[in-house]
Amino acid sequence: MTEVPPEIAEYLASPDTLSEWVRFYRAYPTVTAAVQAASNGETVALFTSEHTAYVQRVVLLEGKPVIEVVLYPSTQARDALVTAYLNHCNPETATAATLQTLPHLLPEGTDLTGIECVVERGNGLAPRFGFRRRLSATGFHTWREYDELHPLGDLYQVLSWHSTGHNIAEGAEAVAILRAHGLPAVGCAACGESLTNRHPA
């Protein structure tokens, strides 16, 4: 029988726990279980948007287990990035420029230690840009050990739906930053929404 640590059992029993976390922790109640599943060829991944849009995966890189987290800009910041990419005449140039510009959308002083900007295949015409952290899973047994030693910190708060004051640039601000770096982002002059430069009727 798979071990279920007390804190995970409590989390699973709570009516407030989102369904994606219930599915993930039932399948992989410990880091050890997740690593074993990944080693057996399973896809060990969770996507959640409870507070911040992000994905958590356990993968094997060169045969070694790694816990990978990718946090994604959302709402108006995401939309501005989409327009910047789709309006560019060269997808490769747009991708490279966007990856270089991503940190400039964050508040000054945001800690990006151990974080790299990445691009992934998206669901539509534009790719998905994000901030990725990879840490060795070796030495961790419980998720609590991992979370306590390696909290997501500043970046998680900056990208959170509930961020107050110190959040990623959105709307007209995001468009201006992207355009200042040579990316043809657009936004509505009236409301700041991207994906159009005309205020919806």
Image: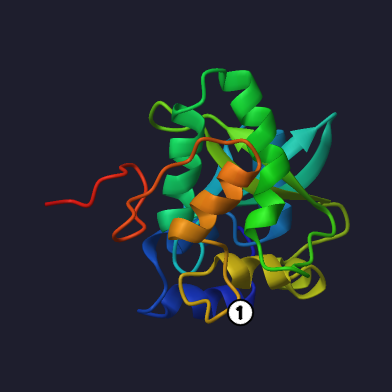
- Residue 9 at x, y percent in the picture: 53, 75
Residue 72 in view here: no
Q: In this view, does 61 lie above or below 76?
A: above
**Amino acid at the residue labelled 1:** Glu
For mark 1, give the secondary structure.
helix
The part of the image, by quadrant, that contains residue 111 is bottom right
Tell me if mark 1 has few (under 14), some (14-19) or many (20+) residues whose alpha carbon lies within 10 angstroms of its own.
few
The part of the image, by quadrant, that contains residue 152 is bottom right
Q: Is residue 140 left or right of residue 162?
A: right
Residue 142 in view here: yes
Of the pair 195 and 172, the residue shown nearer to us: 172
Question: Which residue corresponds to mark 1?
Answer: 7
Of the pair 200 and 73, the residue shown nearer to us: 200
Of the pair 12 and 60, the residue shown nearer to us: 60
The image quadrant where one finds the N terminus is bottom right
- Residue 182 at x, y percent in the picture: 62, 36
Of the pair 62 and 134, the residue shown nearer to us: 134
Q: In this view, does 82 lie above or below 76?
A: above
- Residue 16 at x, y percent in the picture: 38, 79
- Number of on-image labels: 1
Q: Is residue 154 left or right of residue 165?
A: right
Residue at left 41%, top 80%?
14
Residue at left 60%, top 28%?
94
Q: In this view, does 14 lie above or below 176?
A: below
Residue at left 88%, top 58%?
139
Furthest toward the left, the residue is 201
